[in-house]
Amino acid sequence: MSCTTPKFVMRISLILLLVSSLSLADPIFPDLQGQALLDALESAYRPTSTLSYNEARDVLYTIIDNHNDHLTCVYTGFEIYLDHNSSNPRSEAYERGINCEHTWPQSLGATGQAKSDMHHLYPTRIDVNAARGSLPFDDIPDNWTDRWWRLDYHQGSIPGSYIDEYSEEDTNTDFEPREDHKGNVARSMFYFYTMYHDQADDTFFEIQRDRLRLWHYEDPVDPAEIDRTWQIASYQQNRPNPFIIDTTLVLRAYFPELVSVPLENASVSTPQMTSLHPNYPNPFNPQTTLAFDLATDSHVTFSIYDMQGQLVKTLIDAACTAGSYQVLWDGTDDRDTAVSSGIYWGCLTTGEQTQTQSMVLLR
């Protein structure tokens, strides 16, 4: 993907919707990182009680996830009719093919109060829920996918169209949600492990956390997700999912080394995948730091683009060895002239692969 493709430009529209909240929201525990931040988040945001599991599902099906008397599977887009005034929503949903997905599986720690914490519960097609089971989340290469799930069907072959609308299953190995739910999954998982680490399976989290970090930034928070977490909070002591409210928490809580390492090649081991990390701080003024991992030796181009897809500044254009890097952008263009407030994109190109990261400059 080049930095001027329609997909790149279309993503700007979503970011524009979030500029106000990014610039006005107060960071949560801005002076804390790592374990100190995790402890503070658990103390402030873990609910002291939750609804019963039956009550939680009734609320999800008739209020939280009921839109115009319809309930939609988060993994496939499959939709059923369900009257928001239903007296027996659980049974009606089940009869029509929907039940409740625990993003963090019950068998790996979602028991007791955590079982009915709605911040990680979603309506899902019954058969897709069963297929996911307790599998970890990951990006699955298309030729490894055994089943592709969309709407009310599944198939074994790679789809010829609408591929981003499918969830994927590598049987007994991994599960990949459809593209527009990956960030929601990531923020639910970070929430669960933060609040219920005392009962959550540590290995299950560790094998996924790098991938979840990438999904958190590739599929950013949207207004619907913000609205949902506050609706849930009204049933859980007014405690939202903080990873939705402050999107810097993932990096500060679970990857503080990406915030604090110096501006130089910081890795002594070879990263497993090439990836572009979110810039920090964001929003920023006057400068911000972008980090990336390089899995193999490669020619690297790292450039900044504006909302129109026009090149603003090239920060790196050189052969680089495998490792982890950070680069500073001081908010200037190639002529070292300060650019105006707005949304900009960091664009990392290595060989045929290009990754982008949005950032907000507030003068």
Image: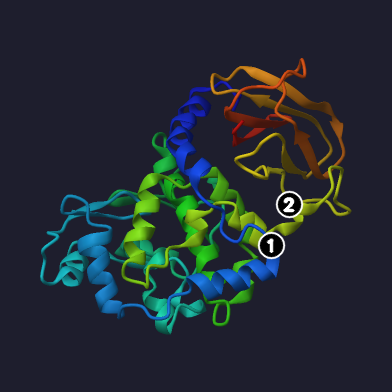
Mark 2: few, some, or many residues within 10 Å (few <14, many ≥20)? some
Query: Taking 256 as reference, is 23 above or below it?
Result: above
Q: Are marks 1 and 2 in contact (CB under 8 Å)?
A: yes
Image quadrant in which the N terminus is located: top right
Q: Position of residue 217 (x, y in %)?
A: 56, 46
Image quadrant in which the C terminus is located: top right
Query: Taking 204 as reference, is 272 above or below it?
Result: above
Q: Position of residue 114 (x, y in %)?
A: 43, 77
Occupied quadrant, residue 173: bottom right
Amino acid type assigned to the residue bearing label 2 in the image:
Val
Query: Taking 49 as reference, is 105 above or below it?
Result: above
The foreground one among 121 and 176 is: 121
Chain-order first, disc 1 or disc 2: 1
The foreground one among 268 and 258 is: 258
Q: Do we see residue 140 in this rendering?
A: no
* Residue at 25% from the left image edge and 76% from the top image edge: 55
| SS class, disc 1 | loop
Return the residue at label 1.
33
Amino acid type assigned to the residue bearing label 1 in the image:
Gln
Label placed on residue 47: none
| SS class, disc 2 | helix
Label placed on residue 259: 2
* Residue at 15% from the left image edge and 67% from the top image edge: 92
Q: Position of residue 312 (x, y in %)?
A: 67, 20
